[in-house]
Each structure stands twice: as C-alpha cells, then as structure tokens.
Amino acid sequence: MKKLFFLMAAALLSLTMMAATVADLKPINRNWSFVADNITNSGTTSPTANTLYEGDFIFMPTANSVSTSKGQSTINGNKCYNSLRIKLAQDRLAFAVYDACTITFYTENHSSRGLLVSTTDNITDETQALARQPESTPVWTTTLPAAGTYYLTSYGKDFFMGGFTVEFEGGGEAVTEYTVSYVNTTGEVIGVDTVEVGATLDAFKYGEADVTVPEGKVFRGWFYSAAVGATKVELGATVENDMRIYAQATDVEVAEVGKFYIYDLTKPFYQEDHECISIIGASYSEADKGWKCEANAVVKIVAGPDVTYVGLNDAEAESYSDNDTLTFSFGAGYIIKTISVFYVNGAVTKDTETGYYIPTAGDGAALLMILTQINDGDKIFLPNGEYDFGTKTLTEINKNNVSIIGQSTEGVIIKNAPLTAHIGTTATLRVMKNVSGTYFQDLTIQNNFDYYKTNEGQAVALWDQGTKTICKNVRLLSYQDTYYSNLSGSVKYFEDCEIHGTVDFICGDASVYFKNNLLYCEKRKKDGGGSDALTANNGPASDKGYVFEGCTIQSVCPVVSLGRAWNNTPQCTFLNTTVDYSAGNFGFESSDIQRWTKNLMNKETGWPIFGEYNTHLADGTVLTPASNVVTFKQADPLTGTNAIETVLSADQAAAFTMEYTLGTWAATATADATQAVCESTADEFEPNGIYLVEADGVFADIILGSEFMDKFALYDGVNYTVRKANARGGFGLPAGQGQEGIEDTAAEVKKVQKIFRDGQLMIIKGNNKYNVLGGLVK
C-alpha cells in the first residue's frame, strides 16, 4: 500500500513542530525525511548549499531559495501562513529519492505560474523539463520515475509552495527507533545516538569535550538549529522523529570599550549563555513575546570600565559610569522586549556649537549607540578607524537629513560580518523606507560576509530604502548585491564613489545617477573563473532606473557584463564609460567586451531600456560597436518586436542627463555634494563656518571659524591642515594656510578621471574639467 508524508510550509520553522502540528501524518518509515536549514520565524531563510539532514528522502534548498510570508494556503484543512518561494530563474530545490514516487505540490491562494522538475543539464530551460505544472493549477501531482536527484525551478514568475506530499509504493519496515545526530559547530556530524520511538532525551551523548570551540568563544549547548536565536534542546524533550541537534559556541561577553550587546528578548534567551546580563524575577511569555516581570523584578548588567549606555525596549540609551553592576527594577506585569548595552570610551554627546556627534576613533559601539538617538538633521563625524558591528545586521538610519561624515574614504571603515546571506537580512547599514536626505561622505561601508566559502551569497553593504540619498567619496565593499536601491519613486546620487562586487552588485529600483564612479568587479569565484553582472535593475516604468555618467570599470573577474534585467521594467544606461584593462584581469580582448547578453535577460514583463554610448579605453579608443541588438522572450507591446538596439546615438545619449534622472532635485544634489574651498588664511575663516583640524593626518578637532585663532596656540609647533565643511557637513580638501606652525599644504586631488566626450578627451580633476592641453573647460 502507499505510505504518505505531508509537510506544511508553516511547519518549516522547526522539525520538532511537525509532529505536534500534523501528528496524524507522521511517517511510519524512513523512505523520506524533510531537509532544510536556517528557516527563521520571520519567514525568511538563507540556507547553505549541501547542508542536509541525513535520510532517504532529501529536500534541499539551494542557491539562496527563500521561505517567505506570501499569504495563506489551506491544505487538507491545515492553514499554512508561510510559503516556500522559489525565485524565478534564480532558485532551485533538490529532491533526492531512493525509489520511484509521486510528489504533490500545493499552491492555493498564490499566483504561481508553475514548477519545473529537471536535471542539472539545463535547469532553467522549461523545454527540457521532466514535468511542468499547468498554469493556475493549485494542486499539481507528478511522478519521479526512479531513484535519483531531481531539481525544481519556477517558470514565468516566482513559485510559492504552501506544502507538498510524497507517496511511495511499499516503503520498508515500520520505525521502532529514531536517530539523534549531533552536529559540530563546523557543520559536520560528530556522532549519532539511537533512541526508542517516544523516548525522552535524558542525557546528551556528546558534550563540550567533543565540540570545536574557537578561541574567544564558549560552548553554549545543543540547539534545534545552527541559526542565531534558535531554541535550545532541553533535557527531557521527547524524540518524535529522526532529528539533528546543533552545537553552538558564541563569543564570551566582556564589558570592555568597543563591545556592544543587543538582547532581543522576544526570541529564545538563555541566561546561562550570557556573562554581562542577568534577569531576576521574570520569565518568557509567549503571549506577550517578551519577558514578563513579577513584583520586584530586576535586570543586572555588568558595567564597563568607562561609560556604559543602556537602552530598554528601544528607548533612548542612558549613560552610567563608576559602577561594577547596573541594576534596573521593574514592577509586576512589565514586559521587557529588548535591552541594548554599549560600552564606550567616554560620554558621546552632540557638540552644541558645531552640531556633530564625534565618537572615539574606531569605537563601533559608540557609533551604534549614536544611531539609536539621533534626530532629524543631525551630523556624525567619524575619525579614521574601523567601526566594527560584528555580526549585527540592518543597522538603521531612521531620521531625515542625517549626515554621516568620515575623515577619509580609506581610513573610515564601517563593517559587519553576517553569519548567513540574504538580500533582505544582511545589510551593514539600512536607510529606512521613505527616510529623506541621508548624506554619506569620505567613508567605506563594508559587508564582510564570507562570500568565497561557497562562492555565493547576497550580502548588502548599503540597503537604501530612502530618497534623496547622496554618497560622495564613498566606497562600498562586498560581493553580491553590494548596493541595493529599494524604493520605487525615490531619487539618489553617487559622485566620485567606488562600488565593489560580483553578481548584480548594483541592484534594485529607484532613479539613481552615478557620476564619475569606479565600478570594480571582484573575483566571481575564489579560484577565478565565472562572470559578473554589474547591475540588475527592477524598477517600474515610472522610475528612470540607473544612469552611469563618466564612470570607470575595473575588474579581476575574467568576464563582465554591464547588466541584466531583474524584473518589472528595468532601465540602465552607461554613458562615456572608461574600461581600464590595465587595472584588472578581464581575460578577454577589448573587442569582445560583454554587454547585455541574452542569457542575463530574465525578463518577460514590462519593456526594458538598456543603453550604451561611447564606452572607451583610457586612451580614448572607442569600444562601443555600431550596433548591439538584444533579443527578449516577450515582444514590445507597442512595436511588436522582441529585439532592442542598445547602442545609443549622440542625440539619444544626450537625453540621459542628471536632470532627466533626478528631476528638480538634481540641482540640490549637485549643490549638497559640492565641496567647500578652505580660505587661504585663518583671518579669512568664516566666523560661523565649520572647520576640521588634522595634525599630521590625525583628527584633532572640529571648530567654528571664530574659534581658530583662540585655539591656535594649541596647534603651535605641529604640522596641521584645515578643511572646511560644506552645506551637509562634509569636509573638502585641505588648503595651505601660510601660518607658522601650520603646514603650507597644497590640496591633493583624490581622484582623476579621463572621459571621452563629443570626440574630445577630457580630464576631470576635483570639481573641474580640463582639456588635454590643461585648459579649463566651462
């Protein structure tokens, strides 16, 4: 007879939930078992390829497949609030079976277009499919004819699956015992224990002595998942199926400057796993999603050696000092949801005269704390140093017109290192939705995700959901999806920046104008090979998309294309681009430069605009061909053709101006990004002007112009340079002051760009344009 196994997507969150939710559907043999890692309560997942459960039936998310909250499915009377999403032409699932079987997919209440079951020979070619779901069929059954691994992909649009069943003929012996596999912190199985069906886990077969614990970390016990925030396996738990339990080792908490701890008490929290906090007289409340206090409940926090900032329930952090232990009291019924602790070097407050917050150089905890309490219009100045956020992601900028200014592009690095990859969960910094006027200058934002571990993984440096964002002299470092513009209808401006990455490292919607930027393609694979797409635009027709003017492409990847379509109505135009072969390792002749290649045009809805004009080498040699036609699957509804010419004429290219891209905000963006010219002598300083003083390149002070002569004695005998702030608080180049004790420094130009325009080679230096004879071009 047939044996039946059923899995709901709502039960993806934990294998242990499965029997309790659908106990009557518990399998009676081992011809199948569910496999997936890193499914989170938020409905997203970033699974690692080849991270599998043991068993005879394998379900494996690959290529960053995601589980996402996309409505509700009702399957066999069970409501499924999450659905597994297979993104069009990006994701696939692998089913490995040890016998012929039938498999049924449920997609009720979703607009999925179907699913492909195929081999890896051509995993996205629907004509090679073993089977294909008929359109608009909510329940689809197909046959897997024999033992093997089968790959499932979507076609037409993303596929959302509420659940699936697998049926085998026969199926083996009834289960009388279950296995408990112990997984090391490094991912491999340490060993397996066998228990009788229905037995309780009264002891752990393996312990700390068997686990790999990196230096500076401590073994925290066994968990149902390797994910951060996973539920801990408690002794006495009933073993209801074959299961894996995961060793976790986390950092030892220490109260020292630069450290920070953000305790999310809405998720599982185990006091024994923390050295800097203890909660007394409170316990977790599932109903309240937080820790509910009894009468006289207290929270104790170990104080740091200098200043400790503590914030409760996302309230503004308050500072404390000179205490070994900080004690906070709560009354009965109070719900604690978050506690944030920042150990910093001295109190960090806003200077009342210049308006800047200035943390100690390299104090990541201080920067995080500042970002929790800034208001509209505030400015932050960061002296040279690394501001390390650790594994923290999605650090928010949630106020309008905030300026974050670094001392230098290479010297100021804001970085994080996510544990898992995903476009929506990894960002180093996130400008929140509809936040207006964020200004970045002279700094680096780096997502330090371990990309080459698997040669893949979306890790965003800047997730920009705001509008009127400006990046000036900013360097964005990551690999896949480095910059994610993510607000339709918004406008953004990049000037004299660097953006590094691999696949789709400039992606999203909005109208973005990139002026004189360096686009640097990193290695696609650790050992070389592969190809990079600079852009993946997915904006609606109402956006202006991406316009690149006077940018330079460098690469250490052998094959590079200007971009591909993501979805909607993508638009992307490259004008006067310099291809710098000398700086990279393109691996192909200049005549064979890649452009909008057909296999990168995953597009069936909307009609894209892709354009290129005057791509050239540094010596002015033009690389753009006379014609480059790209063919799509779908025809343009207006013209009836499915092919577009991507090479623009001079007249066509002239239309893609900054004003075309950014509208009336273009003039404001230009003015805001313009650098102030420092007066030649201190006597000419504007009294209310703001000036940065550096001593041999080291940050010394930010002062008003009226204060300079009063403080001059402090600078006597040291080589100092002075830089003036522009309208948004960013500091221009230093100017010679001609004063004794102050270095007479000529302004150094940070970047020189060469562009070929209207048949002439021009040199961009600072904010000026020169012809080849050195004459200033107006």
Image: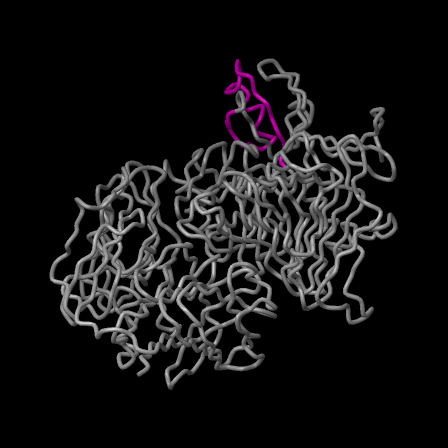
Position of residue 61 in the picture relative to residue 608 (left or right): left
Residue 589 percent across, percent down from the top left: 72, 36
Q: How many marks?
A: 0
Task: Looking at this view, name the residue that lies furthest to the bottom.
Answer: 77
Give yes or no for residue 714 being in the magenta stretch.
yes
Examine the image and state in which quarter residue 5 appears: bottom left
Residue closer to the observer: 676 or 3: 3
Image position of 637 with respect to 370: above or below: below
Q: Residue at x 83, y 53 (%)?
A: 655
Q: Residue at x 30, y 38 (%)?
A: 256
Q: Residue at x 25, y 43 (%)?
A: 212
Residue closer to the observer: 125 or 473: 125
Q: Residue at x 39, y 49 (%)?
A: 419
Position of residue 213 in the picture relative to residue 106 (left or right): left
Q: Quadrant of the C terminus?
A: top right
Residue closer to the observer: 130 or 23: 130
Image position of 617 with respect to 373: above or below: above
Examine the image and state in which quarter residue 494 appears: top right
Image position of 731 with respect to 35: above or below: above
Residue 48 percent across, percent down from the top left: 41, 54
Q: Quadrant of the N terminus?
A: bottom left
Residue interval drawn in magenta: 698-725
Residue closer to the observer: 123 or 503: 123
Position of residue 113 in the picture relative to residue 778 (left or right): left
Residue 246 in view (yes/no): yes
Colour pattern: one colour
Image position of 442 with respect to 298: above or below: above
Task: Looking at this view, name the residue that lies furthest to the left.
Answer: 202
Residue 83 percent across, percent down from the top left: 45, 72
Give yes or no for residue 271 being in the magenta stretch.
no
Residue 352 in view (yes/no): no
